[in-house]
Image: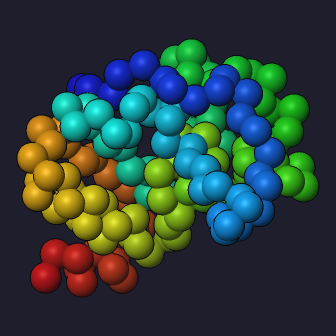
């Protein structure tokens, strides 16, 4: 079981305001998975971002996302996207179908270890991702 802690995200996510820059702060969807700054909590990295709808449905079922968020599903400007990104509910990174999230998770885990964090980094992958960057990350 994952030790995620309670959601710190709004149950209905805000719209995407653009790429981060001087006047646009970076946003993350990871808050639905708990306080990602807490060193004792686990971090969940969801790799198959093309399955975002499944993750959103799960977040609704466990009370971390309001079902009303689906009113904005795949609408222009919404963070509740067809293919999730780092700003989509429940997502910590932007990934793809060839296990790019695995190398990002390895970097997050290494940084957490250097900082003395005790929480784990867990990657959810689909069966089709055991190719591409998967082998490179293991090396």
Where is residue 9 drawn, in percent x and y? 57, 29
Instruction: Tell me if 10 is positioned left or right of 129 in this view.
Output: right
Q: Quadrant of the N terminus?
A: top left
From the viewer's side, name the closer residue of 127 and 58: 58
Q: Residue at x 53, y 64 (%)?
A: 94
| Colour scheme shown | rainbow
Looking at the picture, does residue 43 appear above or below residue 125? Answer: above
Where is residue 126 drawn, in percent x and y? 42, 57
Looking at the picture, does residue 112 appear above or below residue 60? Answer: below
Q: Residue at x 33, y 80 (%)?
A: 133
Looking at the picture, does residue 32 appear above or below residue 97? Answer: above
Instruction: Tell me if 138 is positioned left or right of 131 in this view.
Output: left
Q: Residue at x 20, y 60 (%)?
A: 111
Q: Quadrant of the C terminus?
A: bottom left
Q: Quick check: can you spot residue 84?
A: no
As drawn, which residue projects farthest toward the front?
A: 22
Q: Residue at x 16, y 62 (%)?
A: 110
Where is residue 84 drawn, in percent x and y? 63, 55
Where is residue 71 drawn, in percent x and y? 87, 32
From the viewer's side, name the closer residue of 64 and 117: 117
Q: Quick check: can you spot residue 62?
A: yes
From the viewer's side, name the closer residue of 72 and 29: 29
Instruction: Tell me if 44 is positioned left or right of 10 in this view.
Output: left
């Amino acid at each position: 079981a994952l030790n995620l802690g309670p959601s710190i995200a709004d149950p209905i996510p805000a719209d995407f305001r653009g790429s981060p820059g001087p006047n646009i702060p970076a946003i993350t969807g990871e808050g639905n998975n708990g306080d990602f700054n807490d060193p004792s909590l686990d971090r969940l990295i969801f790799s198959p971002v093309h399955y975002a709808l499944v993750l959103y449905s799960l977040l609704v079922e466990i009370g971390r996302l309001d079902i009303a968020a689906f009113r904005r599903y795949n609408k222009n400007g919404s963070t509740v996207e067809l293919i999730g990104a780092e700003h989509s509910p429940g997502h910590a990174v932007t990934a793809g179908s060839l296990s790019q999230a695995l190398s990002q998770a390895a970097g997050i885990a290494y940084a957490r270890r250097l900082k003395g964090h005790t929480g784990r980094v867990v990657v959810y992958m689909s069966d089709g991702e055991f190719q591409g960057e998967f082998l490179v990350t293991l090396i």
